[in-house]
Image (cartoon, grey):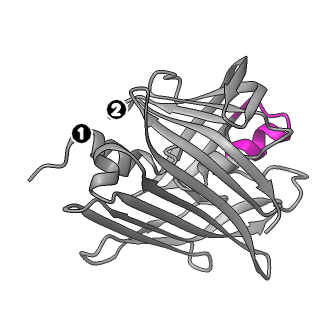
């Protein structure tokens, strides 16, 4: 049985597909936070995403994205996904230590575990069919923390950033660039923002940041697979 397109988009896109980082000089250590997003598709609210950042001690941090279906077929099937990254704060930038992805959409489930051995500079990925490894890269991040890393770069005044991202079979270099400034109204309020496009295709992926206020987007749109949109509902600093 094939999952409906909207459900596949929900499960895959609520990755905050906004899928972090070269060394950003003089970037202060992260501050814990909780950010809640409304997730819509085709103008209809279908779910909620909650992103948290917490200190794990010893210079390590846990960045988590929990999403759930709250309306339509996503709610009816109990569609949920979770992404959890442990990263280290190294040279004033995040570097992924481990990343776990789990998706449950009723009749469709998916998982991925990524582990980075910084001693051997090797990345190991296991989706339940046995591990596969490939060489890592300095400043390596994963798709879960990319949006956060872009926000850190913008906070430091950067207008473009190239990120080495650990994907299934290799390190993928992802390019992000500020393409304009917009005033954006979302449930959390109205904000002057910088619009960021990935890979030069604003129709595929765009994110709007208020970088001096929040390290994550206030709005994100992704047309890949089904016109997904995330809007910030609330942001709370601290544990």
Residue 209 x %, y %: 72, 34
Q: Position of residue 89 (x, y in %)?
A: 77, 67
Of 141 and 53, nearer the camera is 53
Residue 135 or 181: which is nearer the viewer?
181
Query: Is residue 128 depicted above or below 161 in this figure?
Result: below
Q: Which residues are magenta?
A: 150-160
Q: Residue 120: percent from the left, percent from the top?
A: 56, 78
Q: Earlier in the sequence, mark 1 or mark 2?
A: 1
| Residue located at (80% from left, 38% from top) | 211
Circles 1 and 2, Cβ within 8 Å, touching? The answer is yes
Tell me residue 49's x, y (percent): 54, 52
Check the image and report above or below for 51 versus 124. above
Residue 5, numbered circle = 1
From the image, which quarter does the C terminus lie in? Answer: bottom right
Q: Residue at x 41, y 28 (%)?
A: 223
Q: Is residue 166 left or right of residue 138?
A: left
Q: Is residue 157 magenta?
A: yes
Residue pictured at 54% horizontal, 68% vertical: 84
Residue 207: say if magenta: no
Q: Which mark is residue 226?
A: 2
Q: Label 1 neighbourhood size at 10 Å, few (<14), some (14-19), many (20+)?
A: few
Quarter occupied by residue 225: top left
């Amino acid at each position: 049985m094939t999952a409906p397109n909207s459900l596949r988009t929900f499960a895959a896109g609520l990755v905050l597909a906004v899928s972090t980082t070269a060394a950003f000089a003089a970037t202060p250590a992260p501050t814990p936070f909780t950010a809640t997003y409304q997730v819509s598709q085709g103008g209809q609210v279908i779910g909620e995403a909650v992103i948290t950042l917490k200190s794990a001690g010893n210079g390590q941090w846990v960045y988590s994205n929990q999403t759930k279906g709250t309306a339509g077929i996503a709610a009816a099937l109990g569609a949920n996904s979770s992404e959890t990254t442990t990263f280290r704060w190294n040279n004033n930038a995040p570097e992924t230590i481990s990343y776990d992805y789990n998706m449950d959409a009723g009749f469709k489930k998916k998982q991925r575990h990524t582990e980075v051995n910084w001693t051997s500079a090797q990345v190991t990925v296991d989706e339940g069919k046995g591990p596969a490894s490939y060489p890592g890269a300095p400043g390596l991040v994963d798709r879960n923390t990319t949006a956060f890393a872009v926000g850190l770069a913008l906070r430091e005044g950067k207008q473009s950033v190239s990120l080495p991202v650990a994907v299934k079979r290799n390190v993928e270099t992802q390019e992000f660039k500020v393409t304009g400034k917009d005033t954006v109204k979302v449930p959390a309020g109205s904000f002057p923002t910088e619009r960021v496009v990935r890979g030069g295709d604003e129709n595929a992926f765009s994110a709007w940041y208020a970088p001096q206020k929040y390290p994550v987007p206030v709005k994100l749109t992704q047309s890949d697979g089904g016109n997904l949109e995330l809007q910030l509902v609330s942001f709370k600093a601290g544990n």
